[in-house]
Amino acid sequence: MRPRGGLSTAFVLCACAAFPLASPARAAADPPGWLQGYRRSLHGEVLGYQSPYPGPTPALLVRTTDGKMSAGWESEAVPAGYDGDSATFAFMVGLASGYGAHRFDLLVDGKPCCSFRSARDTSEREWTVAGEGGAELSFRTTLVGHFNELFGFMFLKLPKALLTPGAPVRLEVVGEAAGSQDYFMAFEKPAESWIEYRPEEALVRTAAEQALHSLAQGAASKTAGEPG
C-alpha cells in the first residue's frame, strides 16, 4: 500500500502555461495513500457522462426507481501480507442534487456496509457516514456540473476484519424504491492525479519595439503638456 496522505491532498491538478506544444499533454499517476476503489465493473447500466476529469467518462448508473437497480464493481487487490488496521479505497463518483436526497445502500462483498443520500442541493459538497463494523464512507466534491450534479471522490475506509490480503473488495450500490430518477454514478476509471498543459498565445515586444514605444509615450506626454 502506498504511504498514506491527508484527505486534503488534491487529486486533480490543472496547470495552463505557454509551452510550445501542438496539443495538450497530460501526465497521470495513482494518488498516494489510498488503494484504487475501482478496477473493473461487475454489473450495471453504463453511460458516458461528465466527470471530474476532462471529457466524458463511462460510468455505472444507479437510480432510485424500484429498489432493484444496482451496480457492482471491484477494487484493486489489497496487498498480499497487508497488516494495517484499516485500508482506504478511493473512487470517482457523481451524485444528483435537487431530486429529494434519496437513499443508496453500499454493500461490501455482498454484505450491507452503509447508506448515503444524494444531495438536497449543491451546498452538500462534503460529508461522512459511519458504516458497519467501523467502516466509514466520505464524499468530497471537486466539480459542480451544469445541472447542479456533484462530481468528486468517495473514500471508503474498511477495518482489517473486512479485508482479505491479496484479494479485491467487491462493491455494490443499490438505489431505494422511490419512483425517482435521482441517481448515483461510479465512474469506470481509476482515480489518478493529472496535470494538463495547454499552449497559450502571447505577444512579445522586442527591445527595439520597447524603445520606440517609450519614445512615442514621451512625445505624447510632452505634446499633451504644451499650451494650446
Image (cartoon, rainbow, N blue to C red):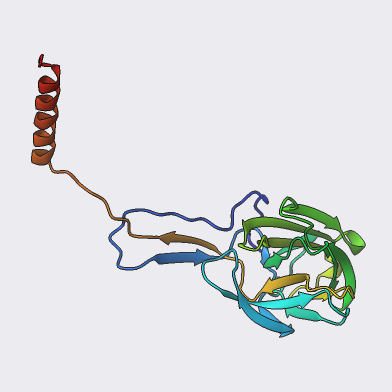
Report the side of 102 relative to 8 (left or right).
Answer: right
From this view, report whether residue 84 is shown above or below residue 215: below
Tell me where residue 48 appears, x and y as whole percent.
Answer: 60, 78
Q: Quadrant of residue 96?
A: bottom right
Task: Work out which residue is located at the far front of the displayed protein and give it.
Answer: 228
Q: How many marks?
A: 0
Near-viewer residue (168 or 50): 50
Tell me where residue 223 appears, x and y as whole percent.
Answer: 10, 22
Near-viewer residue (184 or 190): 184
Residue drawn at (10%, 31%) of the image: 216
Residue drawn at (88%, 68%) of the image: 113
Report the side of 68 relative to 125 (left or right).
Answer: right
Which quarter of the image is occupied by the N terminus? bottom right
Near-viewer residue (54 or 102): 102
Report the side of 176 relative to 81 (left or right).
Answer: right
Tell me where residue 85 appears, x and y as whole percent.
Answer: 81, 59
User: Is residue 102 visible to us here?
Assistant: yes
Q: Quadrant of residue 15?
A: bottom left
User: Is residue 167 visible to us here?
Assistant: no
